[in-house]
Each structure stands twice: as structure tokens, then as C-alpha cells.
Image (spheres, grey):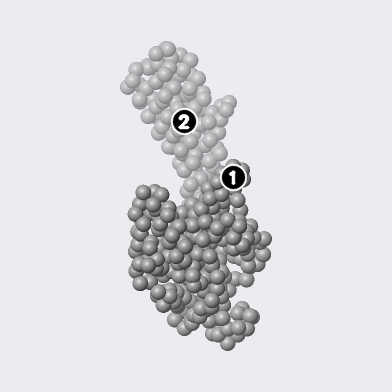
Amino acid sequence: MNESIPQLLSYDEPSLEAAFATLAEDVRTTAAETAADPEAFRLHWLGRKQGRLKLISEAWLKSAPAEARKPLGIRFNQLKQQIEAALEAPASTASSPAAQGIDITLPGATRAPGIPHPLLKTMHEIVAVFHHLGYSTNLGPQVESDFYNFEALNFPPNHPARDTQDTLVIAHQQSRPSRDRLLMRTHTSPVQIRTMIDQAPPIRIVIPGKVHRNDAADATHSPIFHQVEGLCVDTNITFSDLKGTLDHAMKALFGSAVKTRFFPSFFPFTEPSADVQISCIFCNGKGCRKCKHSGWIELLGCGMVDPAVFAAVDQQRTAQGKPPAYNPANISGFAFGMGVERIAMIQHGISDIGHFYSGDMRFLEQFA
């Protein structure tokens, strides 16, 4: 390698261009000569004491007039960048697939795309079943007033049915009227009230969402869980319509062989009310541990909308300047609600609800 420092006789633009073109060619030549020893190339050009770039820079800048120092500095920076690029080139060549003996015809490593959480996947499946029946999706806030969560749904103050919902109340609400006090919604039913107040029948909606109750966490309970509720209001809606709708939905979710049966129950906002059971999908109704040897699994609640709910809705519509639209003499409807976690546990054979919230990738990757 030539260690001599070239002379720069003139500082005009053509002379500078020619001098640095020569240096750039020297960089390329030296890089080729030291391709097997990048460290020797680095020391030759960028060494702290005897690096060629440093020696040439000092020699040329020392005798340069003031007006030539700026263009000289710019060109030296460009030359340094070229030297650093030449240093990186052997490293990238050494790390190339060919240098490492890798078969480049093999498929590359791919990043697995994300998947919906099993709860969201189940929720979307449930909602899709009702979309195919002509229902639309409505959503609402998780922080609700007592009026929408209880009073309009025929839970008057001090009603014993309120105790079963273990409500989480927002702090510092005592100064407000009872119906205006805020709480974490215990079901998605407030969206039914909001929808009826907002629009006249016919209504066919499903309401997926997160709800909150002061439940102690165990294998089948969580203080936060998800529901899908439904509401159908129109003229001449009967309990037979409710049974047919839910029977179709259960068959769509669990298979055409599934049977449904209805038992009398109580919910303040429906009359009559019923609990819905499906034949056990694990033993085909013969009886097993999953169904407690009964052959049936209880899955959801439902009923015909109580006239008291229609009355509360019309009262609120009138207060907002809207005409009454829910006279029970002309209008009827049904409502239903199901827990998403319970359905997901049945679909996938999961015994502990806590797995859904643990964040354990070993559990979640099973659904990829």
C-alpha cells in the first residue's frame, strides 16, 4: 500500500475534485487488497495516530487558505463515509446466506400473525349467528347510571334482586339522586333501554360487551366477564319466536344435533322468564361429569319483555320530547342473555375461567 501523502498544489474546485477522486480510488483499491483483513484496512485509513485520512487532512488543511477549509472539510467527511461503507461491505458479505453455507432456496422464517383472544373469537361467533338472523350490534358505556342499569329494567330501589348482582358502585355518589348514581354495569341490558329510548320499534339487536360484578374469583366466576344479550321488539312477537330463535342459535354454535329445553325462571325485566338448557355436547345427553350426569347444561336466560320496562321506556321518551312507542297492547318483544366465558369453556373444554385472563401464552397459543 502506498503510504505517501499526495501534494495538493491548488485549492480551486477542479483541483479539489481531482484530488479527492484519486483518494476515493485509493480507498477502493485498498479495500480490495485487504478484503481478508478488514482491521488492517481500518487502521490504514482511520487509525487514530497514523491513519492516512488523518495525516492527509492535517497536511492539506494546515496550508489551506481560510476560504478553502469549508469545502475541504465537506469532502473529507464524504471520504470518511466512503471508507466506513467499505468497512461494512466485507461484514455484510461474510454474514450473507451464501457465506454461511445456508440454502437460500429454503423458505424463510415467518412471524406468526396475531390471533383473536379465545373470548373475542367466541363473542364474534355468537354475534355472527344473530347477524345472519337480521340482528344488528349495539354498544354502550361500561359506567352506567342506576336508572339504566336497574330502575328502567324493573329493579326498583331496595328490590331484593339487586343483591344478586353484587354491584360495584362508583365512589362519592351519595349526594346524587338514586337514579343518577354511577356504577359499573352488571349486565349489558342498559343498552336495550338506551336503544328503545332512542328509536321506535321494530328493533332487533345483539349487545356484546364487558360487565363487572363484585364476585370472588374461582374456577367459574370472575369479577370481570363478558355477555351477549339480545332484544327483539315488534308487533306480534311471541314466546314461540323466542324459542325458535334460541334453538337455531344453539344449533349454529354447538351443532345441529343439540337439543334445547326451557325451564321457568325469574328475571325482573321479563315475564314470563326462562332458563335455557342444551343437551350435553360431551356425552350426547347420556350423562357425564361435565353435565353432572343430568344430560343437560344450563346456558342462558331469556323471557318476554315485561310491560313495566316498556312503560319506563315510554316515560323517558316523553321526558325527552319523543312520542310514546311502546304500548304493550300493540308491542311485544323478547330478550335473552348469555355469558361468553361459559360458552367458550364449553366449546373448548376449559375447566377454569382464570385461564382466559392469565396471559399465559402456552394457553393462548392453543387457539392459534
Q: Secondary structure at mark 2?
A: helix
Q: Which mark is residue 80?
A: 2
Task: Indicate left or right for 320 with 275 as reference.
Answer: left
Residue projecting furthest to the left: 14
Comes first in the chain, label 2 or label 1: 2
Relative depth, front residue between 150 and 139: 150
Q: Is residue 146 visible?
A: yes
Total numbered labels: 2
Mark pair 2, 1: CA separation: 69 Å
Relative depth, front residue between 61 and 135: 135
Can you identify the residue that label 1 sits on?
A: 173
Hey, what amino acid is under mark 1?
Answer: Gln
Determine crowd level at label 1: few under 14, some 14-19, many 20+ residues with C-alpha closer than 10 A: few
Q: Quadrant of residue 350?
A: bottom right
In the image, residue 191 sits, relative to residue 89, either above or below, namely below
Residue projecting furthest to the bottom: 286
In the image, residue 288 sits, relative to residue 58, either above or below, namely below
Q: Is residue 136 visible?
A: no
Hey, what amino acid is under mark 2?
Answer: Lys
What residue is drawn where x is 46% and y is 61%?
309
